[in-house]
Amino acid sequence: MTKNRARGPFARALVGVVNAGVTPLDRMRARSVMAANRFFLIAAVVSLPWALIIALADPPVTLAPGLTHLAMVCIWVICVDLNRRQLYLSAAVSGLLVPIAQFTYLASVFSVDAGFQLPLLTVGALAFVIFTPPEWWGGLALTIVATLALVWTYGGAAFDSGQVDMGTPELRVLAVSNVVVVVMILSVLAWFNNYFFVRERRRNVRLLAEAEVAARTDSLTEVFNRRGVSPVLSQTARDGHYSVALADLDRFKRINDRLGHGAGDVVLSNVARTLVEAVGERGTVARWGGEEFLVVLPGMALDEAVEHMERARTAIEKEYGAEGVLENVTMSVGVAHAPRFTSKDEVLRLADAKLYEAKASGRNLVVGATLVGVRRA
């Protein structure tokens, strides 16, 4: 069962709203849209009951502020749809400009003692999360507007007494409630920033790990490439005596010419698999280049190394010598054994010489030798 199917209908709907308009190809846009939709959704849910509270605070004076508060909730819902239609800038500007006007209006109706101007403090933080960096000029403009509105509420005479007939205890309840709203908005913003940071960091770690694996792995055969096997070979040379084998497919060009490169790729993949099965956990297989493979066999004497490679050669000959196979495939192998700390270049040169000896001796052979009288690496 997939993760999306495991979610209930409500959770799927919630995820759909939060991700409305998210474009995975633009990570910065995705972050801003996800943040905007979360804000619009949470703000709408929190503000909806406030519309009724405001309307019933001192009717009929507070009826109009209650209706405008409800209109603000509707606009936030519309902003989610604007994001879905990729009208991001319109959604961001509308989603912040309308509450600036509404909370300034409420401060004039209830007075500054009710604290409705306090949510204006969050506009700056919201703006630089909802807008992408190229659009931060818009966030800066809205932050300036919100700041001027906030200064106006504290400095304007129209905000001193308000228009409603409410006692000090009721005003204090409203003020505390608005402080809670501000704290909640800032906390949600902090949580989202941390969530997105952690998510992106995990994604980057995963992508880096995948890139490192891709850099060390041959994409066709899924075994090590030269870069990937190089540290393995170096460590093997330091740990003790070892053997290496160079295996090359015989007359591989004929396979590509007759059957096409697609068939050749299949052959290479099967040969790599056969080599891996032949050496098991005793060695490491790498694609050395073209149709040539390198096999590193730590702590393995020459006789045993030749035996392993002979097993692989026989398996390939049998697999591609069966009835119905369009082209026979055989492999020549050169094996070199060396003591500890032997130069990698010396060992590889000996293995390459033995490979050419196998080719010259009629192909489809395994030829090996031990390196003696070598220089220490």
Image (spheres, rainbow, N blue to C red):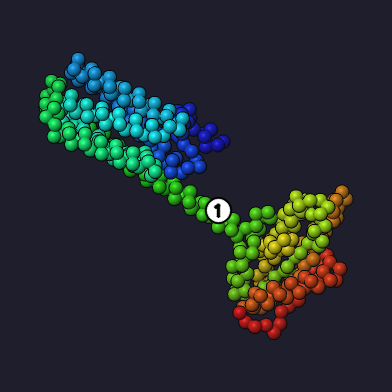
Query: 356 left or right of 192?
Result: right
- Residue 235, picture quadrant: bottom right
Query: 77 left or right of 162?
Result: right
Q: Position of residue 175 (x, y in %)?
A: 18, 31
Estimate how packed mark 1 is, as few (under 14), some (14 to 19) or many (20 or more) residues with alpha carbons within 10 Å. Answer: few
Quarter of the figure that contains the C terminus: bottom right
Q: Position of residue 151 (x, y in %)?
A: 18, 36
Residue at the image position 65 percent from the left and 54 percent from the top: 219
- Residue 117, picture quadrant: top left
Residue at the image position 59 percent from the left and 55 percent from the top: 214
Residue at the image position 70 percent from the left and 63 percent from the top: 289
Q: Position of residue 215 (x, y in %)?
A: 59, 58
Depicted 141 relative to depicted 226: above or below: above
- Residue 159, picture quadrant: top left
Residue at the image position 77 percent from the left and 73 percent from the top: 354
Q: How many marks?
A: 1
One can see residue 38 in this view: no
Q: Position of residue 184 (x, y in %)?
A: 29, 36
Quarter of the figure that contains the N terminus: top right
Which residue is at the far top? 60
- Which of the pair 103/151 is nearer the observer? 151
Depicted 62 relative to depicted 80: above or below: above
- Which of the pair 148/106 is nearer the observer? 148
- Which of the pair 160/157 is nearer the observer? 157
Give the residue number, with chain letter if any, for mark 1: 210
Q: Under tag 1, what secondary structure? A: helix
Which residue type carries mark 1?
Glu
Query: 208 left or right of 50?
Result: right
One can see residue 248 in this view: yes
